[in-house]
């Protein structure tokens, strides 16, 4: 490269001499130059949606930094003490050491409230950005070969993030989080055969016991972060091995990657972006209160405030519990089956299970074994986009159900009316969303096709000599047009007998799904069509 | 590999990377126009703009230094005065804003540097199939075959199978080790008993003062604990989580009582477990007009006039009723413990 030649010819300054000496010292002991050579000019493609995963990564680092600060002051003990800190309304009230030290962090440690709020806001941003990142990957088909396994790794990260969120939320041992644990206890107890024992062992006695907060603390600051960091490392390594996907564009093919090199541009942008994410979280933490535990008081199994809600990312699970109609429980041979809890639990497991295995289902239906490095525009995979929209609506209805009481009081509706409406929406909503999203995609594809072939409406009306009025269509330039052209379609699978001359049930299912996926489709513009269109 | 003994040879799976499945692979696709011409930034064209960008970036970095120093100064400039909430707020605000400026200064400076001054051209890197090339894969297969041959992993099936058995058995101690996460006592027996027993007075939560029947006026509701709970040294919260009760007085003609439970109330005063039969939240909201209880967690509604049967929401069972009466001094007391387990359902509940 010409640049390195230039560097050599320039006379090295004092700083350069030191850098050279240090680099040599490190390399002779670590062969760091191998890593720099392999990764230093690696190309990363640019698109705003690729930042969502970065936001997740950086907010996790913020969580680690702020969380470490919190551990220096927080004591998870459930021993009961009398409050003697500086928050007057709670003076003299009996509470656990965990709640006491959480209050001390908020009111007696300088910067403690700031770190608590930054930690909580960063946790919320962490889960939110993982969710959006997953939606981006889903809707652009970036989970296709060779990235199916990394999708599963990412899915695990999402589950771990929620587990981290819930364990952390419980630690201050305030009234709200205690009620959250109470709900978990009730859900565990409903489990057939082992429920009571699982709850008994987890809480170390009857609910709430005196050990659950220390146990959650160990999970929250040691076990779960260790697993999370290891999983994150695998996620990153696979990202580097597979290289990033890119959107279709001029010069981009399935066999190359176009963008900026790690050093210096991508490193500067990504490193700068870390500071931006951290800075914005710090700004929110300085200006906006989150989880004001001092308003809730210490945990007590008797009181609870109206409008009780979990942190938003647990909302969909809480909402699922709320939507069950009355009376879903029966006793069989003396044993109690609590379907009012088991049914939503099974529903949620199936739902997130489908999210985890979706790449394998789609790969089985298409039978496509090639590597895919061009990210789809959502409109170019109408059925997948429809499925995604249905999933989003399903999740959103469950989520709304977690606020059913607040919706009712805010909009002056009956709580029964809100719940019944959401019960209907849970079934009708996803179907409607699927149909609307799929049809919208097909319409957009037709529009793209029209624009690629005949240009876009310029808004300029011209009167021809014969008196006729026409609107002038402007042609796209080749580069812009290419974005609309570069995609592939699938056709429905034809059912054929296998080598034993039989058509198996699996083949029929696959063909059925394939027809559902690809029956309605808009084919990409071919070269001939393009040539024909440009001729007149 | 013909020389390897039977049962030790490994074969690479056939490659299928080129199978397009049901994709329509067309040879008639339009041609990729190639990279678009480079876009020139103002900083590429005008040295004055370049200089300006440089100064701007340096300003952001300098601002960051100011922010860092300010945050440290604010830490002592805005101390926390015990009991003064405004001082907590100021400390939070000014330390936080200082760090914010420090972080955003670096962030904005670095990103602006990358976008306006660093080499902005797109570079192209070729991708390679993720799979190892044939040579590498053959070498990997060869290594496994070699290891298999040298260890006899496939051939010595007795050794291999006992090893697998030993590894599967290894977690067994863990199952036993975790038993002492909870005490030896049977949880099911505990769950079926509460602090209530014959003659225990109903007391106010949290003061622990007993309640006279004459104090309970029609339409009123009391949050109740068993007398003596407030003085418990151990397991206070655990006992409260089972024994919490709601006491309400309804006009006698409104109460729709089953004949066998008619003696469980006293002049329209009824006591019901406060622990929701759904997942155990306190059923804390009482609608005096309709005699309905609402659980604020999942909105189960119970009708107090009809033995707290479920009229809406996910709960499946009515709230258990505590049989009450009065003692010689006119205080409300329990006739017995609850006649069924309180709180959420569990597997062994009906046993």
Image (cartoon, coloured by chain):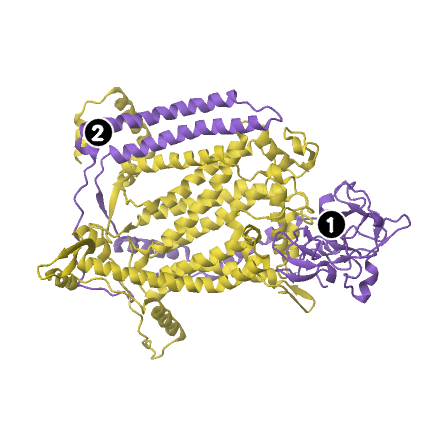
Chain colours: A yellow, B purple
Distance in Å between CA atoms under marks 2 and 1 = 73 Å
Task: Please say if B24 is above or below A205.
Answer: below
Secondary structure under tag 1 reads: loop
* Quadrant of the image containing the C terminus of chain B: bottom right
Residue A33 occupies which quadrant of the picture?
top left
Looking at the image, is mark 2 or mark 1 nearer the viewer?
2
Q: Can see residue B8?
A: no
Q: Which residue is mark 1?
A: B244
- B120 and A67: which is toward the camera: B120
* Quadrant of the image containing the N terminus of chain B: bottom left
Secondary structure under tag 2 reads: helix
Q: From the viewer's perspective, is B75 left or right of A50?
A: right
Task: Please say if A516 is above or below B192.
Answer: below
Residue A418 occupies which quadrant of the picture?
bottom right
Please report the residue visible at 51 percent of the width from the left and 20 percent of the height from the top. B77
Q: Which residue is mark 2?
A: B49
Please report the residue visible at 45 percent of the width from the left and 33 percent of the height from the top. A282
Residue B138 occupies which quadrant of the picture?
bottom left
Q: Residues within 10 Å of mark 2 (few under 14, many from 20)?
A: some
């Amino acid at each position: 490269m010409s640049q390195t030649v230039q560097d050599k010819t320039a006379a090295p300054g004092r700083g350069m001499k030191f850098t050279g000496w240090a680099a040599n010292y490190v390399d002779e002991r670590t062969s760091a130059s191998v890593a720099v050579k392999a990764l230093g000019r690696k190309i990363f493609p640019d698109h705003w949606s690729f930042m969502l995963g970065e936001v997740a990564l950086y907010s996790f680092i913020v969580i680690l930094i702020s969380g470490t600060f919190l551990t220096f002051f927080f004591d998870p003990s459930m021993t009961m003490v009398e409050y003697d800190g500086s928050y007057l309304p709670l003076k003299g009230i009996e509470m656990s050491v965990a709640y006491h030290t959480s209050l001390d962090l908020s009111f007696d440690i300088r910067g403690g409230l700031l770190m608590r709020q930054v930690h909580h806001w960063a946790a919320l941003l962490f889960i939110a950005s993982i969710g959006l990142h997953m939606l981006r990957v889903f809707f652009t088909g970036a989970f296709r070969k060779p990235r199916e396994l990394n999708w599963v790794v990412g899915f695990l990260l999402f589950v771990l993030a929620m587990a981290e969120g819930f364990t952390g939320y419980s630690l201050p041992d305030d009234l709200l989080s205690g009620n959250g644990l109470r709900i978990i206890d009730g859900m565990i107890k409903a489990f057939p055969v082992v429920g009571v024992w699982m709850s008994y062992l987890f809480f170390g006695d009857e609910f709430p016991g005196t050990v659950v907060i220390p146990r959650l603390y160990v999970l929250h600051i040691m076990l779960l972060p260790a697993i999370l960091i290891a999983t994150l490392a695998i996620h990153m390594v696979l990202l580097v091995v597979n290289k990033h996907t890119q959107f279709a564009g001029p010069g981009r093919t399935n066999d190359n990657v176009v963008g900026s090199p790690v050093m210096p541009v991508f490193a500067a942008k990504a490193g700068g972006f870390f500071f931006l994410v951290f800075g914005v979280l710090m700004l929110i933490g300085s200006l906006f209160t989150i989880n004001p535990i001092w308003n809730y008081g210490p945990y007590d199994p008797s009181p609870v405030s109206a409008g009780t809600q979990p942190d938003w990312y647990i909302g969909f699970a809480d909402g699922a519990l709320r939507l069950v109609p009355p009376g879903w429980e029966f006793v069989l041979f003396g044993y109690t089956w609590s379907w009012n809890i088991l049914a939503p639990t099974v529903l949620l497991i199936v739902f997130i299970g489908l999210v985890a295995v979706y790449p394998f289902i789609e790969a089985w239906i298409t039978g496509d074994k090639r590597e895919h490095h061009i990210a789809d525009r959502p409109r170019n995979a109408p059925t997948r986009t429809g499925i995604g929209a249905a999933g989003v609506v399903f999740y959103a209805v469950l989520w709304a159900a977690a606020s059913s009481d607040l919706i009712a009081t805010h909009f002056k509706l009956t709580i029964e009316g809100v719940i019944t409406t959401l019960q209907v929406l849970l079934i009708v909503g996803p179907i409607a969303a699927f149909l609307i999203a799929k049809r919208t995609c097909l319409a957009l594809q037709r529009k793209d096709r029209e624009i690629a072939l005949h240009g876009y409406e310029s808004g300029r009306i011209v009167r021809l000599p014969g008196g006729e009025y026409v609107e002038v269509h402007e042609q796209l330039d080749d580069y812009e047009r290419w974005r609309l052209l570069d995609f592939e379609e699938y056709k429905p699978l034809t059912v054929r007998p296998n080598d034993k001359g039989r058509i198996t049930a699996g083949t029929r299912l696959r063909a059925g799904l394939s027809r559902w996926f690809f029956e309605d489709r808009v084919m990409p513009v071919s070269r001939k069509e393009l040539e024909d269109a440009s001729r007149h | 590999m013909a020389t390897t003994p039977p049962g030790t040879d490994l074969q690479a799976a056939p490659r299928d990377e080129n199978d397009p499945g049901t994709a329509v692979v067309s040879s008639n696709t339009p041609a990729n126009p190639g990279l678009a011409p480079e876009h020139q930034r103002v900083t590429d064209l005008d040295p004055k703009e370049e200089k300006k960008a440089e100064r701007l970036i340096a300003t952001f970095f300098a601002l960051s230094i100011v922010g860092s120093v300010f945050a440290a100064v604010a830490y002592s400039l805005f101390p926390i005065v015990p009991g003064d909430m405004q001082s907590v707020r100021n400390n939070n605000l000014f330390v936080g804003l200082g760090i914010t400026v420090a972080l955003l200064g670096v962030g904005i400076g670095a990103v602006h540097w990358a976008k306006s001054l660093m080499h902005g051209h797109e570079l192209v890197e070729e991708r390679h199939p993720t799979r190892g090339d044939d040579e590498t894969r053959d070498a990997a297969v060869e290594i496994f075959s070699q290891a298999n041959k040298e260890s006899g992993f496939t051939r010595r099936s007795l050794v291999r199978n006992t090893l697998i058995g030993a590894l599967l058995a290894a977690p067994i101690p863990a199952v036993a080790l975790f038993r002492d996460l909870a005490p030896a006592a049977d949880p099911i027996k505990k769950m079926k008993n509460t602090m209530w027993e014959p003659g225990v007075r109903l007391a106010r939560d949290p003061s622990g003062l007993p309640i006279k029947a004459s104090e309970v006026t029609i339409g009123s509701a009391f949050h109740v604990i068993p007398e003596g709970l407030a003085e418990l040294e151990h397991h206070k919260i655990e006992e409260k989580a089972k024994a919490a009760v709601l006491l309400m007085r309804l006009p006698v003609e409104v109460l729709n009582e089953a004949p066998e439970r008619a003696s469980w109330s006293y002049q329209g005063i009824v006591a019901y477990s406060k622990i929701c039969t759904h997942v155990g939240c306190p059923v804390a909201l009482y609608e005096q007009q309709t005699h309905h209880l609402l659980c604020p967690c999942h909105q189960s509604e119970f009708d107090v006039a009809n033995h707290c049967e479920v009229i809406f929401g996910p709960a499946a069972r009515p709230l258990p009723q505590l049989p009450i009466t009065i003692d010689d001094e006119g205080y409300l007391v329990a006739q017995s413990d609850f006649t069924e387990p309180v709180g959420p359902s569990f597997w062994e509940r009906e046993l």
